[in-house]
Amino acid sequence: MLNKLLINNKSFCVFTGSLVIPSLLLPIKYSSILLVILFLIVIYKLITKQREINFPKILLLPFIIYYISIIISFLIDVYFGIINFDFLLRNLVIIIVPLFVFTSNLNEIGIKKMLNISSIIISSLGVVFILLWVTGYMKYFNQQEFKKNEWIKSGITSIDNYKPNDSVFEFEIGTTSKTNSFRKVGSLSKWNKKDSVIRELTIKVKKSNQDVWVYFRNFNKKQSQGAWFNAKTGQIGLTQKGIKAETKLLPNGYFKFILKDKPQRKSTREWFHFSLVSENGGNKWYAEQQKSNKLIQLLPPKFYLSSGQDLLQKKSLLSYKITSFSSLHSYAHGTYMSLVFTFSLMFLLFNQFLNKWIRYLFIAINIFIIFSLASKAVIISLIILFPIYYYKCIYRNKYTVAFCLICFIVVLIGFKGYAIDRFVDMYKTLTIDNKGDLENLSTNERIHIYENYYNLIDKNYWFGYGNINGKNAVKTIYNHDFNTHNQYIQSLFNSGFLGFLLFILFCLSPFILIKSTINNRNEYMFFLLIVLFNFLFESLLYRQWGLILVSFIFAIYLQTFKLKLRWSR
């Protein structure tokens, strides 16, 4: 029974294989479970020694070559006295996934069927992600302002998990608290010289006989300017130069503190920043002086220009990544997830296996999600490679391609959101001395990372640094633990010149082993090019998701065109 299920039943292999790529859209435990299942299937097939699992052994050569580069990195670690078998075991994925594909012995029709199911599952998950995104957005902006993630909070723990927009935000300052602050940035679109920035904080202190002071200010890395308010009595304390401070006692017992100042010259953003401090003119909270916990209540703040522009204005849905507002945010990586949807998009473009309108809908969904994930490398690779590849290699499905291009154009013109912000940030980082406005300047970070790794590689490019030893070297010298964000550099850094050559052989293996014809210039070939291009911007093989994705697409390509091998055995 088990033998028939695992060996003779192609439908089982098709179904199992169709889950490989979609599993990468879920938390890593699901792809790990699937890997265990694939491993058990492969072991069972190899032990039974059935004729059906016979395949040209040369198909495994590229993956063995890559794994040798991993062994080299492991041996370098051993040389430095570090033995870590986790690294070797994790990279066995590069062998397990291809073995499953090859031992399944699916023909081209079986592979097409498997990937048909994959693209449908991926697109359907895309619909679910969009629904989570929209409903999460609505819930997020109907909650109390201080509950939102845009507020950077230090030492603050809210008492309630969810509060509606017009409710009170409550938190306690304990006798062990040291830093208690809130800050949020507001973007200035247009303003004139007559404009003032106005900040309104409405606060009440309960359960305290001691004074609690609020240092309310505009947060600036060069110089912070603001004023001190007594949250217990409403008294205005010290006021710094250029600041106008007001206080009002409201009928409900709250004090409203108002801070006014002028925007800095050529400023594109202003901060709403306040800290709870122990004394007038101070900037610290001395917990040891406190006799008991203080209960602080905050009503929704106001942050605006005197001309009327609301700096806390609700942003459009498109201003947020599609992984926001749901559990996707805790595990999803933009580049890896974008590549999964790109895989689905390519298969939908090059194959007509669904109702035309459903297919077009899925194509539009995949394009939308790719842009909303805002992986610059994936978007650039699609924009550059797709027109070139299509007009050089493929002359079919013109209506589908035209529809795809229209979707790209519409999204590019109308997508004034997160993706556009990312590209604007990249432009400013590269051309205006790192002046991008986004909080996390990914382009700026990568430039510094490349510089750090270049300096290390320049000293030891022949032998490399190993995996764990390399991480330790980067942490010791540059005080960060980022990978290289470039798979080519990563291989050179970890495994030295020999490991780098083996990695290049792995990358070129599909083109070396398979004779190039018009028939194999298809979605598999195009996605291979997408992967190789994205190796320039991400260490894809550094994570389990990337190992599964890359090994699967390489194996599928080799299995599909194994009859065109330059060497039969």
Image (cartoon, helix red, strand yellow):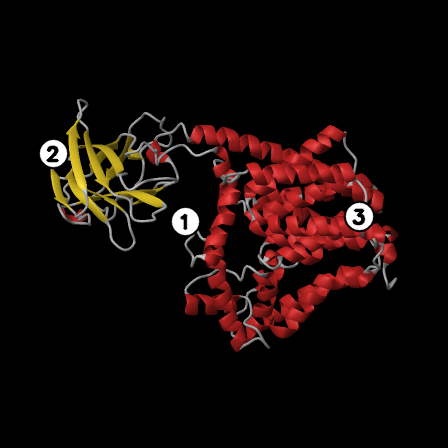
Mark 3: which amino acid? Ile
Reading the image, the residue beneath label 2 is 233
Reading the image, the residue beneath label 1 is 439
* Dot in front, 3 or 1: 3
Q: Is residue 40 left or right of residue 227?
A: right
Q: Residue 53: which numbered mark, if any? A: none
- The residue shown at (31%, 26%) is 167
Reading the image, the residue beneath label 3 is 394
Q: Is residue 167 left or right of residue 174?
A: right
Mark 2: which amino acid? Thr
Mark 2 vs mark 3, CA separation in Å: 75 Å
470 and 129: which is toward the camera: 129
Mark 3 vs mark 1, CA separation in Å: 42 Å
Specify which label sits upstream in the sequence, 2 or 3. 2
Specify which label sits upstream in the sequence, 3 or 1. 3
Dot 3 lies on which element? loop
Mark 1: which amino acid? Glu
The quadrant in which the N terminus is found is: top right
Q: Report crowding for label 1: few under 14, some 14 to 19, many 20 or more residues within 10 A (C-alpha).
A: few
Residue 112 shows in this picture: yes
303 and 37: which is toward the camera: 303
Give residue 237's quadrant in the image.
top left
Residue 464 pos. (x, y %): 57, 73
Residue 317 pos. (x, y %): 49, 33
